[in-house]
Amino acid sequence: MKESNISDFYREMGISEPVLRFGEQVLKELKGRFEEIDETAEYNQLKVLKAMQENKVSEACLLGTTGYGYNDLGRETLESVYAAVFHTQDALVRPQITCGTHALALALMSNLRPGDELLSPVGKPYDTLEEVIGIRESRGSLKEYGISYRQVDLLPDGGFDYENIEKALNERTRLVTIQRSKGYQTRPTLSVKRIGELIAFIKSRKPDCICMVDNCYGEFVERMEPTDVGADMCVGSLIKNPGGGLAPIGGYIAGTRECVENAACRLTSPGLGKEVGASLGILPQFYQGLFLAPTVTASALKGAIFAANIYERLGFGVVPDGKESRHDIIQAVTFGNPEGLIAFCEGIQAAAPVDSFVRPEPWDMPGYDSQVIMAAGAFVSGSSIELSADGPLKPPYAVYFQGGLTWPHAKFGILKSLQRCVGAKAVQLPH
Ligand SMILES: *Cc1c(COP(=O)(O)O)cnc(C)c1O
């Protein structure tokens, strides 16, 4: 076989010359941004490596336990590694934590007691937490256990409403939950610095209040994590950033000894806490995934910035915009019509390593008031650190796009979706 040049190869993979040329033009201007991202990845790679070395990760740590899982060296060491990365006293990192929502529910339910109040000073939390809290009636919610909830929305300009936050804090406020990522809302994602300012304000008014950060999609995007600026707990999913694409399940809570011990006693049982929970054979993927997480996150970030700049240049609304600093890996593009949204998702699917031959179709999903289209061809089912996109089929027809285990794959996925959009006449390339 003759070695083909890269543009021939792109053509063979369905990317036309004009789409490729446009993509390369956009990329040229992103060199500086990408260098900064690589530097952050370099910093975070050292941080993870140092944590692994200092905690003496050994070959024996990669073996698993069965049954009760007493004296699981690998599990205990991994939790120390996470604590070192997040600069916390302790961490709980478990395959028995089934997803991000579970990790957050666990952190909340174990650190709140009947009669306590939970406060969100950054507006409505992620959809799935509505049922955890009891904002939407649900079996087993915090509300059912006599834990009340209060919320203070962000100001119209995205700032913190300090006046009303101060008013909302009362003698029952036990825990404050701060969501770093915008999730599927339009508010800006919070930088670690801003989270630090908010926590400092809360602690100045109520020093014994636990500050928890929903860190989903934010890990390793910056050099610091919320626990570096005063958060008592950082909580997240291992099938997002910190699993590096390799963890097939799991969640983590990194925080103070007290908070983590509370969570462990709830996850397993009072009296057992962190001492049980067999790791089976999963530890190599947890360790290696964490090791890869800084560069994987960097790849996803480059993809998000590339997509933002492409669609911004084509005249579409993008959040965050092409120039803004980044604090999570999610990118929203507003198409304004269903054709663009559908074509974009078809392109992401067609670019996948798994299930590239299937076509995503809009469908009715429980909990949504319109049809939703989702594209994901992932090694780990539902993993959103892998290249994925989804959006509800209703105005303004925005797609939410995230992930990419490698930058070349993120780039290919974005070119492929642009190609589909051009083919569907939802997008016109400039001449
Ligand atoms: C993904 C996510 C969650 C929930 O995680 P799941 O693993 O989907 O349960 C919670 N909060 C934010 C901000 C998220 O991005």
Image (cartoon, rainbow, N blue to C red):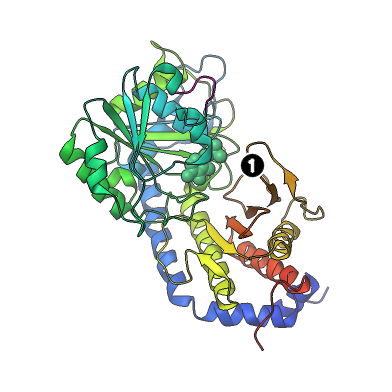
Image quarter where the C terminus lies is bottom right
Q: Identify which residue, 285 or 132, lies in the foreground.
A: 132
Percent across and percent down for residue 90 are 33, 31
Residue 404 in view in this figure: no
* Quarter of the view holding residue 422: bottom right
The residue at the far top in this view is: 271
Report x, y in % for residue 420. 75, 68
User: Residue 216's x, y, as percent?
Assistant: 47, 44
Residue 342 visible? The answer is yes
Residue at x 17% of width, y 38% of height: 205
Q: In the displayed structure, would residue 147 be above or below residue 286?
A: above
Between 148 and 330, the residue placed more toward the observer is 148
Q: For the point 60% across and 77% down, which residue is it?
A: 314
Residue 48 in the image, given as x and y percentages of width and height: 40, 48
Q: Quadrant of the N terminus?
A: bottom right
Q: As displayed, is residue 358 above or below residue 73? A: below
In the image, what residue occupies the spot 71% across and 83% down? Answer: 18
Q: Give, as a single range, the part of the protein colored magenta.
A: 137-142
From the image, tell me which residue sits under label 1: 368
Q: Residues within 10 Å of mark 1 (few under 14, many from 20)?
A: few
Q: Amino acid at mark 1?
A: Tyr
The residue positioned 41% from the left and 22% from the top of the image is: 264
Horizontal arrangement in the rendering, residue 94 relative to residue 227 (left or right) = right
**SS under mark 1:** loop
Q: Report the number of numbered marks.
A: 1
